[in-house]
């Protein structure tokens, strides 16, 4: 007899495991299907984000930043260090320890909330009077479970270039780039987006000569133009060599090198030789082999599952969240959708304001934004006013030796409603949360300007930028 559950979640990444936990909190019987195994062959929860994405990349970013600080910046503090050595094996071991701690934490939360972990690959097989049928194929065979409600949360995978095989040795995607066994002397990166910049920054700090090739004509086109311009300046100063408007023509590999033939933005033929190549050109939804047709579903031309504003598909009682649906491929967006769908199943009426979902690039300085850019708002015909304040004028930023960047706020001319906040600075990922809260509550820039901020702190720049919207910054 098949096991029956109120909710079955397919996928245990940030969207899936949060959906499962929230549904369990609401009193539902819940199972979560997950087939992920680490290199040792051990089943793990957490999906791409915890295992080979957000968490390990941020661990390596932190380690590489420590190495760079010790190697180049402690002298400014009057601290002399000599004979600095890099132990890449130990650094990678620390990264794996962080991953293990996080995935074990999800396992604990599953036990705590009495969520059944079905270890295997989930595939729809049809419907019965009892509910949706899902076949789960694992190491011990295949079993069929019945769900009153299903949440598809299968995430995404790295997009690869045609005719360029990824072996995760010489040519790597984001997974392989997290596990280099040595620092390449010359590293090429195809793609100068979020992941390309973060991974390029890691290996640049550890000693690699890094060149990034970007197909789009503008650098960081999704960012506010002022932020992108400042970022380009900072990354160039750090030593990242970024080329935009590039067309990659051919990639040739040997046992220990790679050569990329490309056409630059001016139409000139060029060749980039490197020891290793990272292909970082975005991600595609994991919607293959789900058996969607068995329940009357199909993907769109880009491989996404169509859903409404509450992530319901066209099939009754089946929902989809995270990277397999429209919207940004962000872990926290998937988490919000997971919690929302669990509450919808419970009969509640939650909604997500997608305009208030923040973006972050974890370089140094970090880049973070929420809401619309100045260009987008002007294109809409919106009358706006802006305020900008530099980190260089902030005592805390100077004290910690991180004076680069600024905060920019955009508000409506008539109502003063905060329409966007754009930050390039150290700890931008934390600073942006204040703007997210303000926008969720429909606050004006004046609301932030009138709130007392601790001194000295980086958060004071948020207040100064808000004051600058009305041309009344106090420290500039």
Image (tube, helix red, strand yellow):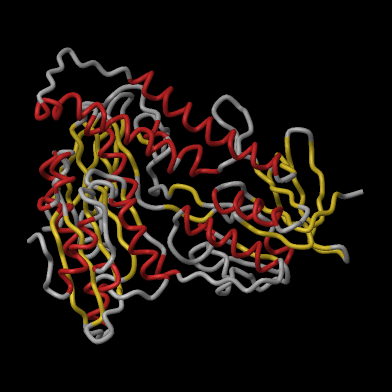
Number of on-image labels = 0
Residue 475: which quarter of the image? Answer: bottom left
Residue positioned 12% across, 45% down in the render: 236
Residue 270: which quarter of the image? Answer: top left
Q: Is residue 296 visible?
A: yes
Q: Is residue 6 left or right of residue 284?
A: right
Q: Residue furthest right?
A: 1
Residue 311, compared with residue 120, is above or below; it is: below
Q: Check the picture and name the quadrant holding the C terminus.
A: bottom left
Residue positioned 18% across, 73% down in the render: 469
Residue positioned 26% across, 70% down in the render: 373
Q: Residue furthest left?
A: 476
Residue 47 place in picture, x, y as percent: 55, 43
Q: Is residue 235 visible?
A: no
Q: Is residue 448 left or right of residue 46?
A: left
Residue 446 place in picture, x, y as percent: 25, 73
Residue 107: which quarter of the image? Answer: top right
Q: Is residue 401 left or right of residue 437?
A: left
In the foreground, 155 or 9:
9
Residue 187, compared with residue 342, is above or below; it is: above
Residue 27 place in picture, x, y as percent: 76, 57
In the foreground, 28 or 222:
28
Q: Is residue 16 left or right of residue 60?
A: right
In the foreground, 396 or 42:
396
Residue 342, compared with residue 234, is above or below; it is: below
Residue 144 place in picture, x, y as percent: 82, 49
Q: Residue furthest top?
A: 83
């Amino acid at each position: 007899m098949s096991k029956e559950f109120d909710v079955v979640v397919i996928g245990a990444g940030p969207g899936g495991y949060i959906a499962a936990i929230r549904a369990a909190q609401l009193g539902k019987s819940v199972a979560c299907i997950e087939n992920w195994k680490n290199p040792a062959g051990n089943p793990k929860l957490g999906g791409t984000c915890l295992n080979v994405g957000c968490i390990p990349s941020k661990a390596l970013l932190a380690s590489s930043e420590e190495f760079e600080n010790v190697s180049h910046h402690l002298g400014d503090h009057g601290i002399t260090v000599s004979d600095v050595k890099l132990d890449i094996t130990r650094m990678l071991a620390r990264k794996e320890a962080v991953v293990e701690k996080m995935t074990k934490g999800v396992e604990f939360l599953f036990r705590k909330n009495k969520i059944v972990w079905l270890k295997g690959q989930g595939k729809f097989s049809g419907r019965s009077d009892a509910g949706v049928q899902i076949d789960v194929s694992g190491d011990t065979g295949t079993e069929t479970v019945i769900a009153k409600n299903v949440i598809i949360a299968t995430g995404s995978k790295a997009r690869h270039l045609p005719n360029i095989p990824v072996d995760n040795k010489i040519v790597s995607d984001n997974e392989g780039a997290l596990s280099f066994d040595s620092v390449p002397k010359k590293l090429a990166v195809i793609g100068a987006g979020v992941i390309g910049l973060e991974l390029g920054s890691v290996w640049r700090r550890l000693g690699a000569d890094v060149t990034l090739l970007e197909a789009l004509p503008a650098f960081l086109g999704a960012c506010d133009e002022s932020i992108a311009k400042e970022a380009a300046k900072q990354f160039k100063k750090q030593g990242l060599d970024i080329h935009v408007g590039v067309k990659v023509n051919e990639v040739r590999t040997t046992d220990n090198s790679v050569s990329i033939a490309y056409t630059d933005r001016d139409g000139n033929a060029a060749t980039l030789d490197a020891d290793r190549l990272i292909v970082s050109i975005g991600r595609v939804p994991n919607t293959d082999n789900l058996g969607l047709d068995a329940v009357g579903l199909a993907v769109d031309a880009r491989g996404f599952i169509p859903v409404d504003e509450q992530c319901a598909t066209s099939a009754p009682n089946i929902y989809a969240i995270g990277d397999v649906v429209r919207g940004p491929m962000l872990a926290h967006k998937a988490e919000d959708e997971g919690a929302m769908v669990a509450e919808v199943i419970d009969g509640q009426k939650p909604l997500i304001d997608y305009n208030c979902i923040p973006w972050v690039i974890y370089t140094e300085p970090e880049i973070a934004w929420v809401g619309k850019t100045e260009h987008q708002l002007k294109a809409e015909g919106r009358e706006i006013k802006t305020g900008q304040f530099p980190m260089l004028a902030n005592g805390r930023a100077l004290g910690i030796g991180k004076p680069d960047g600024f905060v920019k706020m955009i508000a409506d001319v008539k109502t003063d409603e905060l329409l966007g906040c754009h930050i390039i600075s150290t700890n931008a990922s934390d600073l942006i949360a204040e703007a997210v809260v303000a926008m969720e509550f429909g606050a004006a820039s004046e609301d932030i300007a009138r709130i007392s901020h601790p001194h000295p702190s980086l958060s004071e720049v948020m207040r100064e930028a808000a004051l600058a919207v009305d041309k009344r910054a106090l420290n500039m």
